[in-house]
Image: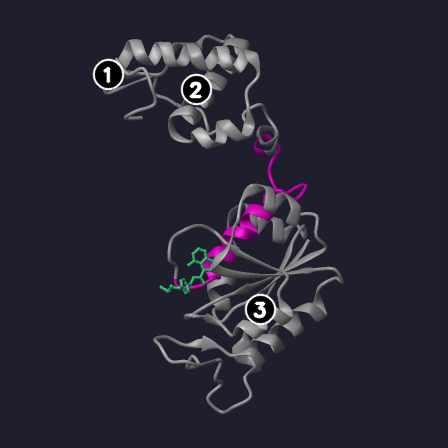
């Protein structure tokens, strides 16, 4: 897959792309990421990329011409049919299903916003979709661009080691993780749950699924609504609730 990013801070992106799963995906040629800096396309001596907002108010707005020139340079190097996504605080909330869809696109151009935003006419004329990564205020679209690229890169065939990818499509899809433990078996008086050292793999799978269901019920009930449960999963969750009630005296999901 081919990704291009239009950003005023290409160094920030290039540095972050060199590590871990992302760095490996690029090294292996599964993914290319190119950065295009609007400042390289500014035409005046000061290399101006922003200007004051019409109508007044604080902050600056990114000008259309340098942004558009950088975008068109990016488009010239990406396959036809690539989609152009603007990263802005008021975009559609990015989620896993969007990463799965984007993985199928021939190319993706991410435009990172900065300052108060970009001239609306750029969005209207040049952008297919607008994405945000969540409801908090960041300083620009660079970190969101890295988030989106990372989420997509791990879905590319061959990006993960075999151990990692085996976990991907497992029964725990749509649930939060179960708890993990490693040595030592006893730490400050706290033991690892006995079932994990039992060698009974069916019991371990059952316990992990139950923990994942229970934690999802406690922490992210909306995920459980969306996913639904089999009869066996309902039974496991009921048992989790009963055991938790006996342990804590809490019969519902209050107080986590
Ligand atoms: C405090 C400024 N806000 C006034 C209502 C608007 C605003 C402008 C620019 C808020 C954030 C930004 C910069 N953020 C992004 O470019 C951004 C972002 C984000 O802030 N949160 C989540 N996802 C994203 S994607 C791009």
Dot 3 and dot 2 residues touching (CB under 8 Å): no
Magenta residues span 139-164
Instruction: Give the residue pinned by disc 2.
Output: 211
Residue 59: percent from left, percent from top? 37, 75
Extreme residue toward the front, this view = 55
Residue found 58% across the figure and 73% down from its top: 122
SS label for mark 1: loop
For label 2, count other residues whose C-alpha is less than 10 Å away and answer few (under 14), some (14-19) or many (20+). Answer: many
Q: Is residue 141 visible?
A: yes
Horizontally, residue 32 falls left or right of residue 174, namely: right
Q: Quadrant of ligand 1?
A: bottom left
- Foreground mark, 2 or 1? 2
Instruction: Give the residue pinned by disc 3.
Output: 123
User: In the displayed structure, would residue 4 be above or below residue 218?
Assistant: below
Dot 3 and dot 1 residues touching (CB under 8 Å): no
Residue found 41% across the figure and 77% down from its top: 60
Which sits earlier in the primary sequence, circle 3 or circle 2? 3
Question: From mark 3 to mark 2, how far is it between C-alphas?
Answer: 45 Å
In the figure, residue 35 lies in which quadrant?
Answer: bottom right
Residue found 53% across the figure and 30% down from its top: 226
User: In the displayed structure, would residue 64 be above or below residue 136?
Assistant: below
Q: Is residue 177 magenta?
A: no
Residue 210: percent from left, percent from top? 46, 16
Q: Which mark is residue 189?
A: 1
Which sits earlier in the primary sequence, circle 3 or circle 1? 3
Residue 154: percent from left, percent from top? 59, 43
Q: Quadrant of the C terminus?
A: top left
Nearer-the-camera pick, 150 or 230: 230
User: In the displayed structure, would residue 125 be above or below residue 87?
Assistant: below
In the figure, residue 114 lies in which quadrant?
Answer: bottom left
For label 3, count other residues whose C-alpha is less than 10 Å away and answer few (under 14), some (14-19) or many (20+). Answer: some
């Amino acid at each position: 897959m081919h990704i291009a990013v239009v950003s005023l801070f290409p160094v920030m992106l290039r540095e972050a792309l060199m590590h871990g799963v992302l760095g490996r995906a690029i090294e292996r040629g599964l993914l290319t990421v190119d950065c295009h800096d609007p400042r390289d396309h500014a035409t005046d001596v000061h290399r101006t990329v922003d200007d004051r907002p019409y109508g007044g108010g604080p902050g600056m707005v990114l000008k259309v011409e340098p942004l558009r020139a950088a975008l068109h340079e990016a488009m010239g190097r990406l396959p036809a049919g690539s989609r152009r996504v603007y990263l802005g605080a008021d975009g559609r909330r990015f989620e896993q299903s969007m990463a799965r869809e984007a993985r199928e696109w021939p190319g993706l151009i991410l435009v990172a916003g900065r300052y108060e935003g970009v001239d609306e006419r750029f969005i209207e004329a040049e952008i297919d979709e607008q994405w945000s990564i969540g409801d908090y205020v960041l300083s620009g679209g660079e970190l969101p661009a890295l988030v989106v690229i990372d989420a997509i890169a791990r879905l590319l065939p061959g990006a993960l080691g075999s151990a990692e990818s085996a976990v991907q499509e497992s029964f725990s899809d749509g649930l939060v993780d179960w708890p993990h433990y490693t040595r030592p078996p006893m730490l400050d008086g706290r033991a690892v749950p006995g079932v994990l050292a039992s060698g009974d793999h069916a019991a371990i799978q059952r316990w992990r699924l139950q923990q994942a269901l229970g934690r999802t019920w406690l922490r992210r009930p909306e995920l459980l609504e969306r996913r639904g449960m089999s009869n066996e999963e309902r039974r496991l969750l009921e048992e989790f609730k009963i055991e938790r009630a006996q342990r804590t005296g809490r019969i519902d999901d209050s107080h986590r």
